[in-house]
């Protein structure tokens, strides 16, 4: 814990690209409803499916 306190804090770096590549690599039957809704909106219903998305300022 002492070492963690002494470690330098890294600043948030803005990515050069605003394009994200999102891959679903794991599946679970008992997911939280919010998680299910997010995956449904991103069209990631099957395992090993992927999608490109634009990053917004809020991320």
Image (cartoon, rainbow, N blue to C red):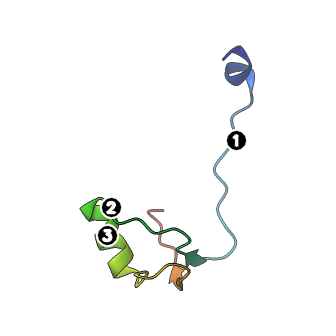
Real-space CA distance between mark 1 and mark 3, rounded to the nearest whole angstrom:
32 Å
Q: Quadrant of residue 44?
A: bottom left
The percent coordinates of residue 3 (x first, y second) are 74, 19
Query: Which type of secondary structure does the marked residue at label 1 adopt?
Result: loop
Q: Residues within 10 Å of mark 1 (few under 14, many from 20)?
A: few
Say which of marks 2 and 1 sits in front.
2
Q: Position of residue 17 (x, y in %)?
A: 66, 76
In this view, the residue in front, 32 or 38, is 32
Query: Does 19 sit above or below residue 30?
Result: below
Closer to the N terminus: mark 1 or mark 3? 1
Pick the front one: 18 or 45 = 45
Marked residue nearer the N-terminal end (3 or 2)? 2
Which residue, as the protein is rendered here, is positioned at the far left? 33
Residue at position x 56%, y 76% in the image: 23
Residue 10 % position (x, y): 70, 41
| Residue 9 position in % (x across, y down) | 69, 34
Q: Which residue is mark 2?
A: 31
Query: Which residue is drawn at the image coordinates 44% and 63% (left, top)?
Result: 58
The reply to whether the C-beta atoms of the residues labelled 3 and 2 are less than 8 Å apart is: yes
Residue on which disc 3 sits? 36
Query: Taking 1 as reference, is 52 left or right?
Result: left
Assign the N terminus to one quadrant of the image.
top right
What numbered label is drawn on residue 39? none
Chain-order first, disc 2 or disc 1: 1
Q: Is residue 51 left or right of residue 9?
A: left
Q: Count up the numbered dots.
A: 3
Residue assigned mark 1: 10
| Nearest to viewer (mark 3 / mark 2) | 2
- Calculate the distance from the C-alpha at mark 2 to the C-alpha at mark 1: 32 Å
Q: Identify the residue at image location x=47%, y=67%.
A: 57
* Residue 9 in the image: above or below residue 11: above
SS class, disc 3: helix
């Amino acid at each position: 814990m002492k070492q963690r306190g002494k470690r330098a804090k890294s600043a948030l770096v803005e990515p050069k690209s605003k394009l994200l590549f999102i891959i679903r690599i794991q599946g679970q039957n008992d997911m939280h409803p919010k998680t299910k809704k997010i995956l449904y909106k991103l069209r990631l219903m099957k395992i090993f499916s992927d999608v490109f998305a634009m990053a917004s300022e809020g991320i």
